[in-house]
């Protein structure tokens, strides 16, 4: 789903649907459900307001590929990342995207990942998982920089 979804018409329609929901006065946590194949999008208002990530552990990774890294290598690593995310059961949610615009404020980072875990033990299980270790060993030689930041969502 990752970058394919971010660059799709369905994603743009999802953003538009969320903007309309917010402007029309919907409150609480808003989620968007859609289909990449049909480009249908539905805005669903949660019954309880608030952030669904409160108390969850968030694992943020910012990175940039070395100049000249072939598109095929980047695509293969994204596919390996999707497979890893599906294999490691401790991952509750994952988001992936590339920088918007020229990225002047991004300090050279071009890609981002956000993983969500129920607790710190799940994060540690992910870090130690063989699929994650293999992914890191494959990705690091192609990266010019990487930043990892973990936190517990408070509000």
Image (cartoon, rainbow, N blue to C red):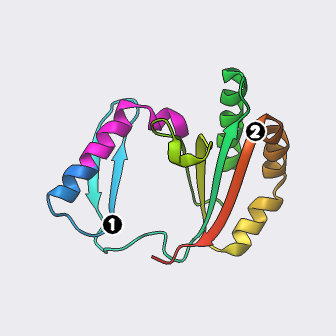
Of helix, strand and loop, which one carries label 1? loop
Please, is residue 151 above or below residue 38 in the view? below
Q: Tag 2: Cα neighbours inside 10 Å, few (<14), some, or many (≥20)?
A: some
* Residue 35 rendering spot, x and y as whole percentages: 38, 37
Q: Quadrant of the C terminus?
A: bottom left
Residue matched to label 1: 29
Q: Residue at x 46, y 36 (%)?
A: 5
Q: Residue at x 24, y 51 (%)?
A: 19
Q: Is residue 89 left or right of residue 44?
A: right
Look at the image and give the residue range highlighted in magenta: 1-17
Mark 2 vs mark 1: give the one in front: 2
Q: Residue at x 72, y 49 (%)?
A: 146
Count of numbered tags: 2
Q: Is residue 154 left or right of residue 136?
A: left
Name the N-terminal-most of marks 2 and 1.
1
Q: Is residue 89 visible?
A: no
Q: Is residue 140 visible?
A: yes
Tell whether position 71 is magenta.
no
In the picture, residue 29 is in which quadrant? bottom left
Between 114 and 31, the residue placed more toward the observer is 114
Q: Which mark is residue 50?
A: none
Report, in whole angstroms, how far the alpha carbon at label 2 lies from the one at label 1. Answer: 35 Å
Q: Are marks 2 and 1 in contact (CB under 8 Å)?
A: no
Tell whether position 3 is magenta.
yes
Q: Main secondary structure of the magenta part?
A: helix
* Residue 12 rendering spot, x and y as whole percentages: 33, 37
Q: Residue at x 62, y 71 (%)?
A: 151
* Residue 6 rendering spot, x and y as whole percentages: 46, 38
* Residue 149 rendering spot, x and y as whole percentages: 66, 63
Furthest-left residue in this view: 24
Residue matched to label 2: 143
């Amino acid at each position: 789903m990752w970058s394919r979804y971010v660059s799709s018409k369905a994603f743009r329609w999802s953003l538009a649907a969320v903007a309309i929901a917010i402007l029309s006065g919907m409150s609480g946590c808003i989620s968007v459900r859609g289909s990449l194949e049909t480009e249908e999008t539905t805005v669903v208002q949660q019954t309880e307001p608030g952030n669904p990530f409160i108390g969850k552990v968030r694992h943020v990774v910012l990175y940039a590929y070395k100049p000249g890294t072939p598109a095929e290598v980047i695509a293969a690593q994204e596919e390996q990342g999707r497979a890893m995310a599906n294999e490691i059961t401790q991952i509750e949610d994952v988001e992936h995207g590339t920088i918007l615009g020229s990225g002047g404020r991004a300090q050279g980072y071009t890609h981002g990942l956000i993983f969500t875990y129920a607790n710190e033990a799940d994060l540690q299980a992910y870090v130690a998982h063989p699929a994650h270790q293999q992914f890191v060993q494959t990705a690091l030689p192609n990266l010019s920089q990487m930043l990892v930041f973990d936190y517990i969502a408070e509000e």
